[in-house]
């Protein structure tokens, strides 16, 4: 088996804007962890990636949507395998959908950048001040929040310098940070207070790329019923 990266080229219609990957048996399993999609008119000369990211490690249908582009071919590049099971990737079937229209010219209306696929539902996000990387997280699981044990949070980081998305499950703080209060402390640390773990507070330190326990949240027990009653999910406040 040749080492990464692995490429697969798909014939596209003239205006392309998404690639769905169907689920099924293990032979239909898409196992790309980090990868990208690029467009070409001739299959030889390729433009910059139109989408990058990391897919969730699942056999379910996965779709990448990107800004419509004129293309005859779309190239899927895999840089690693989703579950770390070996130097291989697999896609049994891939489709390219036709976009409605090309976007307006950037000089008159601006333009969107490339699409970023995360291996989770990014409920919360923060910019790391020291690196410009984007930190996101979901809950105790990548795609669900109910029934949490309150012991972990699934996170991911997008690095614009490399276009890579790296996933991590944070367990050392014993905190499920789904729907937390989010702020930044005086040192630039990202503070997540409350969430599925009502009384937890955790702090992310960007230079060391690490999470630490910040102590008890300000969300004290007398306030919890009041907040639930009014369906209010506030961010952190100064006291």
Image (spheres, grey):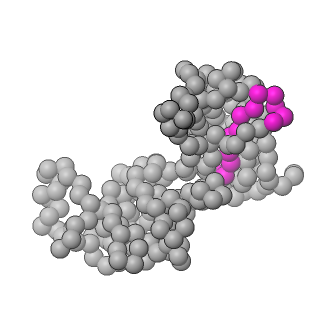
Residue 123: x and y, percent?
A: 40, 52
Q: Is residue 139 magenta?
A: no
Q: Give percent across and percent down for residue 236.
A: 26, 65
Q: Quadrant location of residue 158?
A: bottom right
Tell me what residue is drawn at x 33 percent, y 63 percent. 182
Q: Residue at x 59, y 29 (%)?
A: 68
Residue at horizontal 68 percent and vertical 48 percent from the top: 35
Q: Is residue 139 or residue 47 the one in the foreground?
A: 47
One can see residue 193 in this view: yes
Establish if 228 lies above or below 181.
Answer: above
Where is residue 24? Give x, y as percent: 64, 34
> Would you say residue 39 sits in the magenta stretch?
yes
In this view of the protein, can residue 22 be seen by the observer? Answer: no
Residue 237 sits above or below residue 92 on the image: below
In the picture, measured across the screen, residue 41 lies left or right of residue 188, that is: right
Image check: 86 left or right of 218? right
Q: Which residues are magenta?
A: 33-45
* Left or right: 119 as drawn, with respect to 94: left
From the top left corner, tell me how far across and down residue 132 is, in percent.
52, 63
Q: Give the residue at x 54% y 67%.
A: 131
Residue furthest out toward the right: 1
């Amino acid at each position: 088996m040749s080492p990464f990266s692995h490429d697969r080229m798909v014939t596209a219609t003239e205006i392309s804007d998404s690639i769905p990957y169907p689920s099924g048996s293990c032979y239909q399993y898409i196992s790309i962890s980090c990868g990208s999609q690029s467009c070409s008119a001739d299959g030889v000369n390729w433009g910059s990636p139109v989408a990058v990211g990391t897919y969730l490690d699942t056999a379910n249908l996965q779709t990448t949507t990107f800004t419509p582009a004129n293309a005859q071919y779309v190239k899927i590049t895999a840089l690693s395998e989703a579950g770390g099971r070996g130097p291989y990737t697999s896609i049994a079937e891939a489709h390219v959908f036709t976009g409605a229209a090309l976007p307006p010219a950037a000089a008159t209306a601006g333009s969107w950048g490339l699409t970023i696929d995360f291996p989770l539902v990014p409920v919360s996000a923060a910019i790391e001040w020291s690196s410009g990387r984007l930190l996101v997280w979901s809950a105790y699981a990548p795609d669900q929040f109910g029934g949490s044990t309150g012991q972990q949070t699934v996170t991911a980081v997008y690095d614009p310098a490399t276009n890579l998305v790296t996933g991590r499950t944070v367990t050392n703080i014993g905190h499920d940070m789904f729907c937390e209060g989010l702020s930044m402390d005086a040192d630039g640390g990202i503070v997540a207070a409350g969430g599925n773990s009502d009384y937890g507070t955790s702090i992310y330190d960007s230079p060391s790329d690490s999470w630490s326990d910040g102590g008890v949240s300000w969300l004290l027990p007398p306030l919890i019923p009041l907040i639930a009653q009014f369906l209010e999910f506030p961010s952190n406040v100064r006291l």
